[in-house]
Amino acid sequence: MATINNNYMKLPGSYLFAEIARRVAAYKEAHPEADIIRLGIGDVTQPLPQVCIEAMHKAVDEMAHKETFRGYGPEQGYAFLTEAILKNNYESRGIHFDTDEIFVSDGSKSDCGNIQEIFGTDNRIAITDPVYPVYLDTNVMAGRTGELQDDGRFAGVTYLPCTAENNFQPELPKEKVDIIYLCCPNNPTGTTLTREELTKWVNYAKENESVILFDAAYAAYITEPDIPVTIYEIEGARDVAIEFRSFSKTAGFTGTRCGYTIVPKTVKGRAADGSLVSFNPLWNRRHTTKFNGTAYIIQRGAAAIYTPEGQKQVKELVSYYMENARIIREGLNEIGLSAYGGVNAPYIWLKTPNNMPSWDFFDKLLHEVNIVGTPGVGFGPCGEGYFRLTSFGDRQNTIRAVDRMKNTLRF
Ligand code: PLP
């Protein structure tokens, strides 16, 4: 009989969102009239920028004619998109990559989940706590961890606590780690790493021959000038870092799907014989073997954001959500709650009052003001006592939610 990949049995199941749905459904059944506002979602609510729609319509029409029809495209992405990305997001900052160092995909989740395949299973990984769960779960599936322990952590993984006490800046690990996942701006905490902090990590990676997997899915939300928009702004990063970017939150592509990964040829690992091997051809091999390219129509839509009009429309979209973030953050401060993030990210990470457990705070919000958020403990043990609200709702609901909290919540 076929056997299973037993590593999957180590995973506790996606308890977080299932449990949220269960509690909301139970409340709705008992209170059918309740007008529930969801500030827990990580999905966007506003339509795609008009430039993307127009470019995609045009691309659909091309598909209708033999002369302009497209079948399989290059797995790594069409040149019209990769060149536009490199020019606008990197060359504009004085950072040069060749076109074979960028890989267009169907989004960052796939990329930051799949990237671990080109690393040996004996690598030790470091993740922040709390964390976007994809980094950890994909390594559990690959057998790069031990079992889940009573403290909610997997054996064999280095956890980097990020709490208000350390200003959400992870400390360098005491032990040597090989792969470091950093997410900046961060989901779930909404906080960022400064240039100085990021330099520390790049230097650590250089000294320890580690690789940084840098998830910049929310780079478009950075408003403060001293926060690096790409890790390659840091000297030496192109020797140690792989960067993931996404059109999902930048331009509302969560349902349309497009992202990309930069794998500089200078990022290397050791082969079994001790020789140094670049990760770039390995990722190219993996990508071309297991992926057949992002749809032409979608890539045309994505490329449209790099036109002057596209840049304007994307800025408006991001500003819309960031205004929601401001409304939530300031509202929480007014009722005396400590709120982090929301300045360079669409997430607000609040400290629950009097160290109330995250799930108790979830119930309080649901029952007293009919608002749904995400309990921080769902992102890792250090998320206990925190709670995530997102600014991806529409303006009216965001204002109503904050008013409800201000008028009703008492601690
Ligand atoms: N990385 C982080 C930190 C995210 O929060 C998300 C989505 O929520 C992703 C990656 C995935 O983005 P995509 O829609 O491009 O797969």
Image (spheres, rainbow, N blue to C red):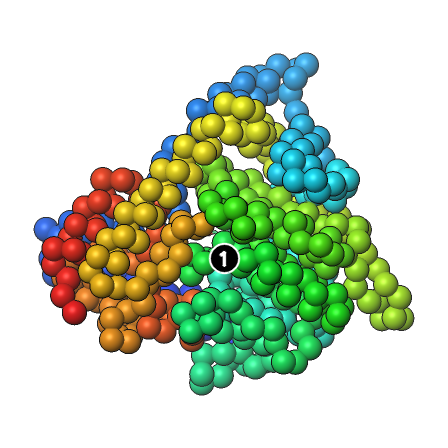
User: Can residue 396 be seen in the rendering of this structure?
Assistant: yes
Q: Residue at x 49, y 73 (%)?
A: 161
In the rendered image, the vertical position of residue 107 relative to residue 214, given as above or below: above
Left or right of 160? Residue 95 is right
* Residue 296 x, y percent position in the rendering: 61, 30
The amino acid sitting under disc 1 is: Thr
Viewer-side residue, 351 vs 303:
351
Q: Quarter of the image containing the C terminus?
A: bottom left
Which quadrant holds the N terminus? Answer: bottom right
Outermost bottom residue:
150
* Displayed quadrant of residue 275: bottom right
Task: Identify the residue position indicated by label 1 in the image.
Answer: 192
Residue at x-position 18% and y-position 46%: 400
Tell me if I can see residue 9 in this picture: no
Count of numbered tags: 1
Pick whichever, 36 or 198, lies toward us: 198
**In the foreground, 22 or 124:** 124
Q: Is residue 40 above or below residue 71?
A: below
Secondary structure at numbered mark 1: loop
225 sits to left or right of 25: right
Q: What residue appears at the point 26 percent right and 64 percent down from the top-left corner?
A: 337
Mark 1: give few (<14), some (14-19) or many (20+) Cα within 10 Å.
many
Q: Position of residue 355 (x, y in %)?
A: 28, 76
Q: Position of residue 285 (x, y in %)?
A: 77, 50
User: In the figure, is residue 54 to the left or right of 334?
Assistant: right
State whether label 1 is within 8 Å of ligand 1. no
Q: Is residue 25 above or below residue 308?
A: below
Q: Position of residue 183 (x, y in %)?
A: 54, 58
Q: Which residue is at the front of the view, 353 or 47?
A: 353
Tell me which residue sits at (59%, 56%) in the image: 195
